[in-house]
Amino acid sequence: MASFSKSVKLYKDMFGCACSVDYGPAKERPEPSGSDFYEATSLTEGLMGIDFEEKAYWRKEFRYPQGKEEKKKWKEERLARKLEKQMARQQEEEQKLKQLMDKKVHAEEIRRKKGRHYTVSVALPGSILDNAQSPELRTYLAGQIARACVIFNVDEIVIFDESGSTQPSTEGTFTGVGKKGNANVQIARILQYLECPQYLRKVFFPKHQDLQYAGLLNPLDCPHHVREHELSEYREGVVLDRPTKEGKGSFVNVGMRREVRIDKVLQPGLRVTVQLDEPGNTVSRVLTGKVVSPSVPRTEAGLYWGYTVRLAPSLGAVFTESPFKGGYDLTIGTSERGESTDEVFLPSFSHLLIVFGGLKGLEYSVECDEALDIADARVMFHYYLNTCPTQGSRTIRTEEAILISLSGLRPKIHEALIRTSTLDSLRSMKK
């Protein structure tokens, strides 16, 4: 190894001491003497500001307590210091927890503001399928209605029977897509099939004649039709028939390669909405989540989560059998004899219902309901509107009327909701 020379020069004006050490090659270095040690100590004292003599003196002065009283006093002081540290640590943890809770509350408030708390329902008679000339066209007509409702975020579709039947329900044995089949049940079955995510259809919809031509229909492609590799906090799934350990929840298939363990034990074959704990977790073999209401994605995240299908035996049952507490607080009937939508301002609402007539109009549906003792159909609704006042055709088909009406009412609904949010914000400011 080549010889080297190292020189260190320190100046009095910088460190308060002078020292210059010059060593030769490593092999020729002399053993350190007492003077070298003194110089190194002085150098350290000058650089670090430490007085070794004072430190040694302090060590000599310190002594452990002698006697019972001194020991007792020393222990009390030591315990007091420990308690002070514990209290400080506890206060720090409480402050961190409070900050975390404030963040969660703030996030929850943002989430609530982001969510949608109102619903839009559409009611129409199943007899509209009678106007289709073939089973294929009947199926395609149901697909058009499903697409129109999904485009405008309809939360509920009610299919009512306008034939004048007084039966309490429309359930029974059905013969399929032919003219002799039950049109109400057929259209409801097709609507439910399209709303269901693709990976769940084999479980909930076995082969049926009503679904013979469902493969011709355009997909709805709703937000809850989540693809396998798509990240989503919420997913639709089916409870699997698998044994679970005691204290553990059931397994759910949510359309991913990995199954999800939920927080409850549920009956196998049940369709559930699952909120995943870690949607982006790619390490765990089994994901975890909890079962939530199907309305939670809408109310908390503002997502459109598909529609529900309800069968009503009559037009009157559309109102009386409402699934919402308090029923529909705003109802609209559509007819060419109604008032123009251009001159209407809708009030605030929580649950909106829009009713469409069949081949002979909404007035015919009112006349056929024996339970309704009403001469004028306008009495049943808050608003009776003509959504296409200058129509160029004598008749507007129901699937066309849905698109026209929802398109015309969309800005009216938006204005009503803006007024409601403005009033709520003003009330909160006054408080």
Image: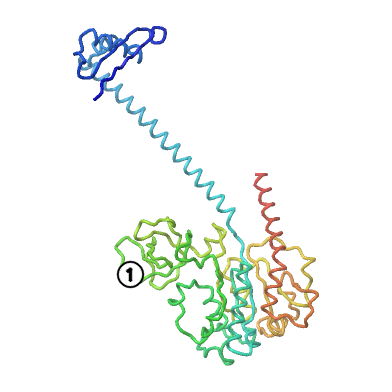
- Please tell me which residue is depicted at 55% across the width and 69% down the height of the picture: 221
Could you say which quadrant of the image residue 35 lies in? top left
Q: Position of residue 152 (x, y in %)?
A: 64, 68
Left-right relation of 108 to 379: left
Q: Position of residue 411 (x, y in %)?
A: 71, 63
Of residues 40 and 262, the one nearer the viewer is 40
As drawn, 47 above or below 242: above
Of residues 84 and 369, the one nearer the viewer is 84
Q: Position of residue 302 (x, y in %)?
A: 57, 59
Q: Position of residue 143 (x, y in %)?
A: 59, 78
- Please tell me which residue is depicted at 55% across the width and 68% down the height of the picture: 222
As drawn, 45 above or below 116: above
- Mark 1 residue type: Arg
Q: Residue furthest bottom?
A: 180
Image quadrant occupied by the C terminus: top right
Could you say which quadrant of the image residue 383 lies in? bottom right
- Please tell me which residue is depicted at 72% across the width and 75% down the height of the picture: 334
- Within 10 angstroms of label 1, few (less than 14), some, or many (20 or more) residues? few
Of residues 154 and 430, the one nearer the viewer is 154
| Numbered disc total | 1
Residue that mark 1 sits on = 242
Of residues 401 and 165, the one nearer the viewer is 401
As drawn, 166 above or below 242: below
Could you say which quadrant of the image residue 188 lies in? bottom right
As drawn, 110 above or below 194: above
Is label 1 in a helix, a strand or a loop? loop
